[in-house]
Image (cartoon, grey):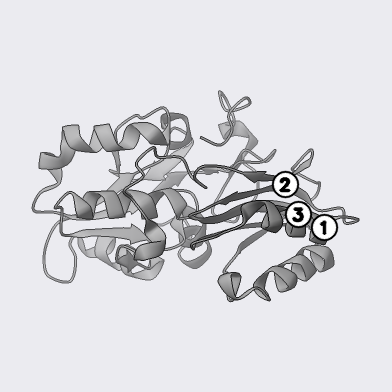
Amino acid sequence: MTILNIAAYRFVNLADLPALQRAIGQALEGSDIKGTVLLAEEGINLFLAGDAAEVNGFLTWLRSDSRFEGLASKESWSDSQPFKKRLVKIKPEIIRMNHPAIQPASGRAPAVDALTLKRWLDQGHDDHGQAVVTLDTRNAFEADCGNFVGAIDWRIDKFTEFPDAFKTHQADLQGKTVVSFCTGGIRCEKAAILMREAGLTDVFQLEGGILTYFEQVGQDHYNGGCFVFDDRRVVDADLTPRPELVANTADRGLN
């Protein structure tokens, strides 16, 4: 496998987005890197793939900006380029929720790391003896590709439906430790903030999402694969493609 795939995001207040868009475009110009970089006033979200030296060189350049210093990325490898083109786009949100009061750059919800979540699931409760539930913040078709055993899945078709789904089911989560999760951490971070601001106190986000859980824990307490937003479509715990799980995902993209 010769193509390095990276996914990264950061909620951080960004100004002068057109200038940043131009700078990133120039930094990528002349490379074989493809994928998408999304920019919004709330931060950056990127999915890129290419030659390892070029991708790492771009990350080094990006991290030289104090706003992105230490930006963590999730890495995997593929035999071929999973993206067809390269885009650097300005959007109202780096992950659309249509809930402008949620500002992750102003403060994160508490996070739980993959090893802690595994321990909680092993023992059936958190460190205070309270029941733990995992809450899927992804779209229904993603959940159908694979999920944590017993995860709560509200069958939303797009992330903008999450706030209303939460209002409907909020009472069901009272008295439980809720761990929200998604592919790489961005949606579950916004979701956790929303739930805490609505008065649900025992809410955590899964740090780094499913992909980091796969990397650090593997398949424990998880069945199937994880949908990813590139031509691989679904990967397993080793981050290798699972073509048998790709049904009904061919035309899906970011929401």
Left or right of 75? Residue 51 is: right
The reply to whether the C-beta atoms of the residues labelled 1 and 2 are less than 8 Å apart is no
Dot 1 amino acid type: Gln
Nearest the camera: 59 or 176?
A: 59
Image quadrant in which you'd find residue 171: top left
Q: In the rendered image of this protein, does residue 56 appear above or below residue 192?
A: below
Residue pointed to by mark 2: 35
Image location (x, y in percent) of residue 31: 88, 56
Q: Residue at x 36, y 45 (%)?
A: 100
Image location (x, y in percent) of residue 27: 80, 61
Left or right of 204? Residue 246 is: right
Identify the residue at the far front of this view: 16
Q: Residue at x 57, y 25 (%)?
A: 247
Q: Nearer the viewer, mark 3 or mark 2?
A: 3
Nearest the camera: 74 or 102?
A: 102
Distance between the Cα atoms at labels 3 and 2? 16 Å
Residue 221 in sight here: no
Distance between the Cα atoms at labels 1 and 2? 15 Å
How many dots with numbers?
A: 3
Q: Callout 3: 10 Å neighbours few (<14), some, many (20+)?
A: few
Which mark, by number, is residue 22? 3
Residue pointed to by mark 1: 26
The reply to whether the C-beta atoms of the residues labelled 1 and 3 are less than 8 Å apart is yes
Q: Tell which circle, 3 or 2, labels the residue nearer the N-terminal end.
A: 3
Left or right of 84? Residue 244 is: left
